[in-house]
Image: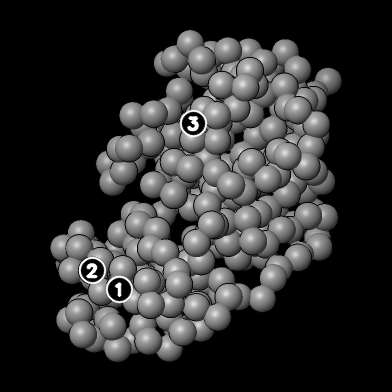
């Protein structure tokens, strides 16, 4: 397996630090689009067939492996086949939930989510949303998907104004993604989740984060901030034609979840 290479000097330094001191490294990952291919039905998403085994091997070699996802943590564990992986932490709902060693901790959803859940059907009707638009209820957040529409971007843009207004009334924020608008509580993002996770640990020897969508940019910001503090970092993009903003900031760009797994398989030599 060829060792992965970085297209930036800062990324190359981060990869070198992971290889030199793996026991102190923290590897972070998004789920959908990064470890699991994007599909029309979110309930049909499953991690790449080699993802669980690869993460299990890395978890035995590095300081921490953490998945940070907008999905409920238990759902990501189920869809990823991650149950039983020692050393793996899953932060669901952008860090509101934590799954570790089979134990799940989760707060009560804020009241604004219940309000938005009640009002969302009438908002979609008022917007003239196509029948193919569907809502994914994540408990702590609500995601409105347009991927199944004949013109998904047009449908997304038609909904944006009313979704913004609903979010403001309910005390929520709108997080755009790959043909999806997600209503969620403010203050929840992957950068904060990554920073909070690291704050509870000793200073890492290096940090890597791999993502694919706009919601992952906050985690990229966290990696950049850590670099400014002297912690080597690597930003990996699971590339797609739908989102290019991450590729423009990434140190390493690979071809979708299969490319992510191939990259990870070459990151560290198998334990002796």
Residue 52 position (above or below residue 113)? above
Q: Secondary structure at mark 1?
A: helix
To which residue does mark 2 refer?
161
**Figure quadrant of residue 110:** bottom right
Q: Nearer the viewer, residue 68 or 109?
A: 109
Characterize the local packing of mark 1: few (<14), some (14-19) or many (20 or more) Cα atoms within 10 angstroms.
some
To which residue does mark 1 refer?
165
Instruction: Left or right? Give the position of 53 relative to 158.
Output: right
Q: Nearer the viewer, residue 128 or 134?
A: 128
Marks 2 and 3: in contact by CB < 8 Å?
no
**Figure quadrant of residue 101:** bottom right
Q: Is residue 46 visible?
A: no
Image quadrant occupied by the C terminus: top right
Q: CA distance from mark 2 to mark 1?
A: 6 Å
To which residue does mark 3 refer?
236
Q: Point out residue 70 in the picture as x, y percentages from the top left corner.
A: 53, 59
Q: Secondary structure at mark 2?
A: helix
Picture residue at 63% right of the left edge, 29% below the top: 207
Instruction: Left or right? Give the position of 124 relative to 222.
Output: left
- Of mark 1 and mark 3, the one earlier in the sequence is 1
Q: Nearer the viewer, residue 192 or 271?
A: 192
Residue 236 position (above or below residue 196)? above
**Figure quadrant of residue 155:** bottom left
Q: Is residue 200 visible?
A: yes
Picture residue at 72% right of the left edge, 13% below the top: 20
Q: CA distance from mark 1 to mark 3?
A: 34 Å
Q: Point out residue 98 in the picture as x, y percentages from the top left corner.
A: 71, 58
């Amino acid at each position: 397996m060829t060792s992965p290479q970085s297209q930036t000097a800062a990324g190359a330094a981060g990869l070198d630090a992971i290889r030199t001191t793996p026991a102190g490294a923290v590897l972070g990952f998004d789920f959908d689009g990064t470890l699991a291919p994007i599909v029309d039905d979110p309930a049909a998403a499953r991690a790449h067939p080699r993802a669980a085994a690869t993460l299990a091997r890395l978890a035995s070699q590095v300081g921490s492996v953490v998945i940070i996802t907008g999905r409920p943590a238990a759902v990501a564990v189920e869809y990823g086949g991650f149950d039983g992986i020692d050393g793996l932490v899953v932060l669901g709902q952008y860090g509101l939930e934590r799954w570790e060693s089979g134990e799940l901790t989760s707060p009560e959803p804020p009241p604004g989510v219940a309000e938005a859940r009640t009002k969302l059907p009438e908002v979609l009707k008022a917007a003239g949303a196509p029948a193919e638009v569907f809502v994914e209820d994540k408990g702590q957040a609500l995601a409105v998907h347009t991927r199944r529409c004949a013109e998904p971007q047009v449908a997304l843009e038609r909904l944006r104004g009313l979704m913004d207004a609903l979010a403001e009334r309910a005390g929520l924020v709108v997080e755009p993604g790959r043909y999806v608008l997600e209503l969620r509580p403010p203050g929840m993002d992957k950068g904060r989740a990554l920073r909070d996770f690291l704050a509870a640990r000793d200073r890492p020897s290096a940090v890597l984060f791999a993502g694919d969508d706009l919601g992952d940019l906050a985690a990229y910001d966290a990696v950049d901030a850590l670099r400014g503090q002297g912690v080597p970092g690597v930003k990996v993009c699971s590339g797609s034609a739908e989102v290019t903003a991450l590729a423009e900031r990434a140190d390493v760009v690979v071809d979708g979840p299969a490319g992510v797994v191939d990259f990870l398989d070459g990151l560290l030599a198998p334990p002796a």
